[in-house]
């Protein structure tokens, strides 16, 4: 990674932007203060809401940080498929004493307005999810001194990221919690994906820009592994979800290590796009029938998910989590960064010893 970008954060540790109220200013500030790169998640927020969080974060730290925004979704879903799913979810709304949301809410997540705010009030880093920004957008960010990072889930997507002029590509493996950042949602491949180590190797050979590895990383030894595979830094989400600074619901934090939730899977149940979550009743009952319809399904299920959380029922919540969720540690975010950095250093020492003949035989 370019020295200018790595100079922003001493440790190759990036806190993933987790939308839905998880990546709050206090979490990003704690990570940045400890030597990582903290991130705010602007997804599902208004432009003013994003701006207020940036102001709050700047009051907590003078260290660099990033802001993540969603690319607009160009293709509308089949209204008939959404209607069928809405009928299936009617019982959920009744059970939680709420109404289903309006699936026809805005599709662009306020993208243009958020970009305008970020150009008027530049932040050190902006990352993009669900697609590739135009070359003009990336150039405009560069003109105000902002680095641009863009997610990719395949080598072909990484090539598109490089063509955009972005400073780095975030290679997201199938192990990652939350939404897969595929550039186009293909229903035929929506439940598939490439494991992180294989993806990093493929992306590293496909592009010349730096790679940030994301997906299932919970330990410093795993950071060492992706660095050895060619990444310049690692992005961790689920690892930070359990920290006290995280804005995740307490039930969500507890579920990460609750033996009741034994596995994760990619599901469209909550949003209409493939996203990795702990398997609960909602995923089991509705996942097989959810259409490829983002953000329509997200808007449709939002009131139900909020009502389930208010009722204290984890079985109706979107419990986003990566495959390494059982390894979550309830440490303060800053301490977690320090522990990860120490584990990374120890792994580097072990590899060095092995390379010089002092390791296992």
Image: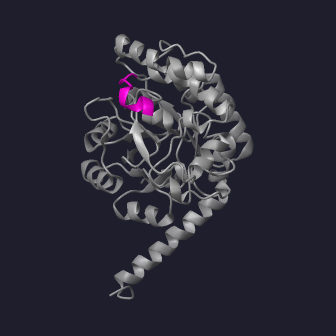
Which quadrant would the C terminus be assigned to in this image? bottom left
Residue name at image x 52 percent, y 45 percent: 16
Q: Position of residue 265 (x, y in %)?
A: 40, 43
Of 234 and 95, the residue lying toward us: 95
| 134 with respect to 343 (left or right) | left
Q: Nearer the viewer, residue 190 or 181?
A: 190
| Residue in front for this viewpoint, 186 or 53 | 186
Quadrant of the image occupied by residue 358: bottom left
In the rendered view, does 248 fall on the left or right side of 110? right
* Above or below, comparing residue 44 to residue 343 in the picture: above
Question: Percent x, y for residue 254?
Answer: 62, 49
Question: Is residue 139 found left or right of 63 in the rendered image?
Answer: left
Residue at 50% from the left image edge and 68% from the top image edge: 344
List x then y, in percent, for residue 249: 65, 40
Q: Position of residue 109 (x, y in %)?
A: 51, 22
Res 281 visible: yes
- Whether 116 is among the magenta residues is no
Q: Which residues are magenta?
A: 285-293
């Amino acid at each position: 990674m370019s020295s200018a970008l790595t100079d922003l954060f001493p440790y190759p540790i990036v806190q993933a932007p987790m939308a839905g109220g998880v990546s709050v200013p206090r979490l990003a500030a704690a990570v940045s203060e400890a030597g990582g790169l903290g991130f705010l998640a602007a997804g599902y927020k208004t432009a003013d809401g994003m701006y207020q969080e940036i102001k709050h974060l700047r009051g907590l730290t003078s260290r660099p940080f990033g802001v993540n925004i969603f690319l607009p979704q160009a293709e509308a879903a089949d209204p008939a498929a959404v209607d069928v799913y809405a009928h299936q979810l009617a019982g959920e709304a009744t059970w939680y004493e709420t109404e289903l949301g309006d699936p026809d809410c805005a599709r662009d997540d306020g993208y243009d307005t958020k970009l305008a705010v970020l150009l008027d009030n530049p932040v050190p880093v902006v990352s993009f999810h669900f697609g590739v920004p135009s070359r003009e957008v990336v150039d405009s960010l560069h003109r105000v001194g902002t680095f641009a990072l863009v997610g990719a889930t395949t080598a072909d997507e990484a090539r598109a990221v490089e063509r955009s002029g972005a400073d780095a590509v975030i290679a997201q493996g199938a192990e990652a919690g939350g939404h897969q950042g595929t550039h186009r949602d293909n229903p035929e491949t929506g439940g598939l994906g490439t494991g992180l180590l294989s993806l990093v190797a493929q992306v590293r050979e496909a592009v010349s820009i730096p790679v940030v590895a994301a997906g299932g990383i919970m330990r410093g030894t795993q950071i060492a592994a992706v660095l050895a595979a060619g990444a310049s830094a690692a992005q961790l989400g689920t690892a930070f979800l359990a920290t006290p600074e995280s804005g995740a619901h307490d039930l969500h934090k507890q579920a990460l290590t609750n033996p009741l939730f034994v596995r994760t899977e990619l599901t469209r149940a909550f949003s209409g796009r493939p996203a990795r979550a702990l398997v609960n009743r909602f995923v089991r009952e509705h996942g097989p029938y959810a259409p490829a319809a983002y953000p329509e399904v997200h808007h449709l299920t939002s009131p139900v998910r909020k009502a389930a959380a208010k009722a204290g029922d984890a079985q109706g919540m979107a419990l986003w989590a990566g495959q390494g969720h059982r390894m979550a540690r309830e440490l303060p975010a800053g301490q977690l960064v320090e522990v990860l950095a120490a584990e990374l250093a120890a792994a580097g020492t072990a590899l060095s010893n092995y390379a010089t003949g002092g390791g296992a035989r």
